[in-house]
Each structure stands twice: as structure tokens, then as C-alpha cells.
Image (cartoon, grey):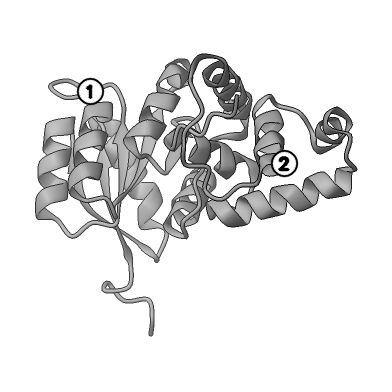
């Protein structure tokens, strides 16, 4: 059978609250494709575990004693870039989203997420998809808009045409396909075609992932 320990995704849980760690471990134990291979209570322990354990993914709390999740994420991604990291946080910590994205996280999950949604997020990230909760998507739009007004455009446009850069810029302002078309004097179908090309060139599959990619690579269109 393919469902062997060798085939299972190896996950480390990092949180300074034992009860939360225990709860997440119980949730993940119900999913045959996932194996929890370690747990840590702070960032320093997480780094040591990542160095000494065969791990595919880390669920990382943000606020922890000794070393927080942001610093731990940065160090782990530098040393083991292939390890996926999903940030675990509470509602009032949304301001950390963009710093975490720049550190290299692949997902961002609120701690009140339903068990099935947590497993689904882990599976999506394992498949190479970035994930943030839909409720935070407007904040991504806002941040990209702010960056576009305060930073110069990056030299690397990832082979986007001038028109595709325009469409990406308007998407970063939070405009719908119809609104982008009206602003650029093109049809909604043409906008969709441009977005398809943008997603293909950036190696993503939807608008949210395109925005995450743009933030990570400082793709700011002026």
C-alpha cells in the first residue's frame, strides 16, 4: 500500500502552549497522509529540530519566548529552503503577515480555523500552493498598493509584458476583472487572458498566489 510511513508528510508543530500543540497533533493524527515527527515550544527549539529531523513542513507560532516565529522562519528557510512553513496566529497578529511572507512562509492560518481547513491548507501547501485566509486578501491588496507608492519598480519583471504589468498593478489595487478592463480600455475577456499569462509566467494558479509572489519578489509596478 502507498500509505506507509515513508510516504507520509513529516510535520513539526511549534507553539509555546502545550495544549495547542496537543490539539493540533490530535487533529493531524486523524489524517493518514501526515506524520507529526516533532514539537517545539519556541523558535530556538524549532531551528534545532529542523536541523536534526527529516521534516517536510513546519506549523510555526509567531509569538513565543526566547525566539519568535518570524526569526525562526527566516533562519530555517535560509538553511533548509525546501521545508514549507505555515504560520499559526490569532486575529490581532495580522500585521505580521507581510514580514512572514518575505521570510518565506508558504501559508498563514488563523488559530480558530476548523480542523478540516487546517488539513486542507497543509495539503495545498504541500502541493506547492501558497495560502492565506480569504479574510486577509484585502490586506494583501492594501499592502501592495502601499508598496507601489513607496518603492521603485524591480528590474526583474519575470518576462511580463508592459500590458501584463499594468494588469498586475490594477489587480494589486483590488480591482475586479471588469474594473481593470474599464480602466485599461480592454474587454473583460482580454483581462482574463492577461491574468492567465501572468499566472503562467509567475508559476502560480490564482490571484492570491500572484499577490504573494509579488510581495516576496518586491514586484512593485509604478
Query: Element at badge 1?
Result: loop
Identify which residue is drawn at 52% across, 52% down. 120
Identify which residue is drawn at 9% across, 53% down. 52
Residue 48 lies, in percent from the top left, at: 9, 43
- Which disc, if any, is residue 90? none
Disc 1 target residue: 64
Which image quadrant for residue 88? top left
Q: Is residue 192 visible?
A: yes
Q: How many marks?
A: 2
Identify which residue is drawn at 43% across, 23% down. 90
Q: Is residue 110 left or right of residue 144?
A: left
Q: Quadrant of the C terminus?
A: top right
Instruction: Tell me whether circle 2 and circle 1 mark residues in contact (CB < 8 Å).
Output: no
Image vertical order of residue 188 relative to residue 221, above or below:
below
Comes first in the chain, label 2 or label 1? 1
Identify which residue is drawn at 49% across, 30% down. 112
Marks 2/1: CA distance?
Answer: 44 Å
Query: Which class describes the residues within 10 Å of circle 1: few (<14), some (14-19), or many (20+)?
Result: some
Amino acid at each position: 500500500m502507498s500509505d506507509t510511513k515513508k510516504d507520509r508528510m513529516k510535520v513539526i508543530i511549534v507553539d509555546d502552549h502545550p495544549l495547542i500543540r496537543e490539539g493540533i497533533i490530535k487533529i493531524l493524527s486523524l489524517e493518514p497522509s501526515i506524520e507529526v515527527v516533532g514539537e517545539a515550544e519556541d523558535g530556538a527549539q524549532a531551528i534545532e529540530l529542523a536541523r536534526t529531523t527529516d521534516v517536510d513542513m513546519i506549523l510555526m507560532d509567531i509569538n513565543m519566548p526566547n525566539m519568535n516565529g518570524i526569526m525562526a522562519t527566516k533562519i530555517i528557510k535560509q538553511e533548509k529552503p525546501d521545508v514549507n512553513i505555515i504560520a499559526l496566529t490569532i486575529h490581532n497578529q495580522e500585521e505580521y503577515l507581510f514580514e512572514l511572507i518575505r521570510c518565506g512562509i508558504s501559508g498563514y492560518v488563523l488559530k480558530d480555523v476548523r480542523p478540516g481547513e487546517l488539513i486542507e491548507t497543509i495539503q495545498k501547501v504541500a502541493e506547492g500552493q501558497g495560502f492565506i485566509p480569504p479574510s486577509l486578501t484585502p490586506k494583501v491588496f492594501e499592502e501592495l498598493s502601499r508598496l507601489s507608492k513607496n518603492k521603485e519598480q524591480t528590474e526583474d519583471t519575470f518576462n511580463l509584458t508592459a500590458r501584463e504589468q499594468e494588469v498586475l498593478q490594477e489587480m494589486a489595487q483590488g480591482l475586479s476583472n471588469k474594473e481593470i478592463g474599464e480602466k485599461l480600455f480592454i474587454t473583460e475577456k482580454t483581462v482574463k487572458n492577461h491574468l492567465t499569462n501572468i499566472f503562467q509566467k509567475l508559476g502560480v494558479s490564482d490571484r492570491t498566489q500572484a499577490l504573494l509572489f509579488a510581495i516576496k519578489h518586491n514586484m512593485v509596478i509604478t
